[in-house]
Image: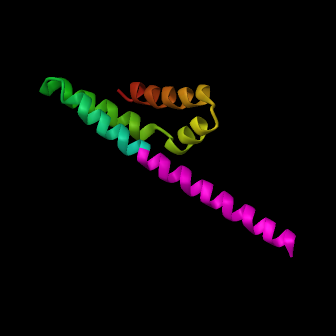
Amino acid sequence: MKKKLLALSAVIGLALAGTSYANEAETKKQQDLRSCKAQSEQLSEDARAKQQETCKCVVENTDYEALVEAKNNGDMAKAQEIKTKAQQACLGSK
């Protein structure tokens, strides 16, 4: 009985952790989109459109769940790799 309870607790804990990463990932994505908008407001109209397009591309190509997990695990090299990969995907699409 104790083993079943322990196993069930572990499964629930993992499910909650996964949900937490998903919520953090969505929050981070929304923050990045707001940041893009704020940064573009400082630019001329022509530059603004191009910057917003590039920024949106980076956000869409970023694996936020993996990014949040890497940051929560203290793996900043992995977090930087995820960001760089997203930026390179956008550079290659132009």
- Is residue 12 left or right of 1 when viewed as pictured? left
Q: Residue at x 36, y 45 (%)?
A: 30
Main secondary structure found in the magenta portion: helix
Most foreground residue, 48 or 72: 72
Task: Examine the structure image and report whether residue 11 is included in the region drawn in magenta.
Answer: yes
- x, y percentage for residue 8? 75, 68
Q: Quadrant of the N terminus?
A: bottom right
- x, y percentage for residue 57? 36, 35
Q: Residue at x 63, y 60 (%)?
A: 15
Q: Residue at x 44, y 49 (%)?
A: 26
Label total for image: 0
- x, y percentage for residue 45? 13, 27
Does 44 appear above or below 2?
Answer: above
Q: Quadrant of the C terminus?
A: top left
Q: Looking at the rendering, which quadrant does residue 31 occupy? A: top left
Does 33 appear above or below 44?
Answer: below
Q: Residue at x 54, y 38 (%)?
A: 67
- Is residue 84 left or right of 40 when viewed as pictured? right
- x, y percentage for residue 29? 41, 43
Task: Examine the structure image and report whether residue 56 is included in the region drawn in magenta.
Answer: no
Most foreground residue, 2 or 77: 2
Q: Which residue, as the protein is rendered here, is positioned at the far left?
A: 45
Magenta region: 1-27
Q: Which residue, as the protein is rendered here, is positioned at the far bottom?
A: 1
Structure colour scheme? rainbow
Q: Looking at the rendering, which quadrant does residue 10 occupy? A: bottom right
